[in-house]
């Protein structure tokens, strides 16, 4: 059974996680140095989200057709996304085995690492 049954559940989970971590000093520091747009394509359930970070702030939008051209696009299932954000996934291994697909520069996605680490740490504390 899938962790997320609907795209609204997946969007809500990730949106709430980012709302919570955005208040943390470590996340605020990471956001200050981040200028990046990442589009996440999820399947099972189907959902598209765009994370845009610039000038110390971020937005997450659920969109189907956006005019914003992302720097990087990631694709994965909802279950892989859950493992990704909870730290249960070896991300480089998942990229190698294509559990996570990447379109764009791997170097650019690595800019998200500090923010991802804060999210993973915070997500582990909330369970």
Image (cartoon, rainbow, N blue to C red):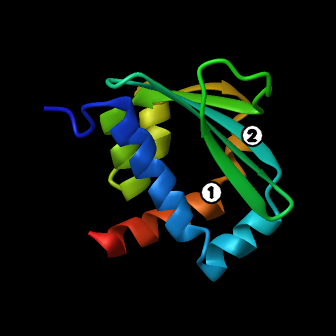
Name which quarter of the figure residue 113 lies in. bottom right
- Residue drawn at the location 75% of the way across and 40% of the way down: 37
Residue 5 is situated, as x and y percent measured from the top left of the image, at: 24, 32
Question: Left of 31 or right of it: where is 99?
Answer: left
Give the x, y percent position of residue 20: 50, 69
Question: In this view of the protein, can residue 118 be seen by the observer?
Answer: no
* Image position, residue 8 (x, y; %): 39, 36
Residue drawn at x 44%, y 70% as measured from the top left: 121
Q: Residue furthest bottom?
A: 25
Tell me the mark number nearer the camera, choosing from 2 and 1. Answer: 2
Q: Residues within 10 Å of mark 1 (few under 14, many from 20)?
A: few
User: In the rendered image, which residue does mark 2 sit on?
Assistant: 37
Q: Nearer the viewer, residue 90 or 35?
A: 35
Q: Is there CB contact under 8 Å for labels 2 and 1?
A: no
46 horizontally vs 114: left or right: left
Residue at mark 2 to residue at mark 1: CA–CA distance? 14 Å
Task: Give SS at disc 2.
Answer: strand
Q: Would residue 104 be seen by someone viewing this image from the given angle?
A: yes
- At x 62% / y 39%, what residue is drawn? 61
Q: Which residue is mark 1?
A: 113
Q: Nearer the viewer, residue 95 or 10?
A: 10
On the rendered image, what quadrant is the N terminus found in? top left
Q: 38 left or right of 121?
A: right
Image quarter in which the C terminus is found: bottom left
19 vs 100, nearest the viewer: 19
Residue at the farthest top position: 65
The answer to whether 41 is drawn above or below residue 110 in the figure is above
Mark 2, residues whose alpha carbon is within 10 Å: few (<14), some, or many (≥20)? many
Secondary-structure class at tag 1: helix
Q: Residue 32 in the image: x percent, y percent?
A: 81, 67
Residue name at image x 46 percent, y 58 percent = 16
In the image, residue 69 above or below residue 51: above
């Amino acid at each position: 059974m899938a962790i997320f049954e609907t795209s609204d559940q997946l969007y809500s989970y990730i949106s709430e996680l980012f709302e919570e971590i955005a208040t943390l000093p470590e996340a605020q520091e990471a956001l200050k140095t981040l200028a990046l747009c990442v589009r996440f394509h999820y399947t099972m359930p189907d959902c598209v989200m765009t994370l845009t970070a610039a000038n110390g702030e971020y937005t997450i939008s659920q969109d189907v057709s956006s005019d914003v051209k992302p720097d990087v696009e990631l694709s994965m299932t909802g279950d892989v996304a859950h493992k990704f954000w909870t730290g249960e996934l070896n991300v480089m291994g998942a990229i190698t085995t294509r559990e996570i697909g990447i379109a764009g520069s791997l170097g650019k996605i690595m800019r998200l690492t500090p923010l991802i680490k804060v999210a993973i740490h915070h997500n582990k504390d909330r369970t």
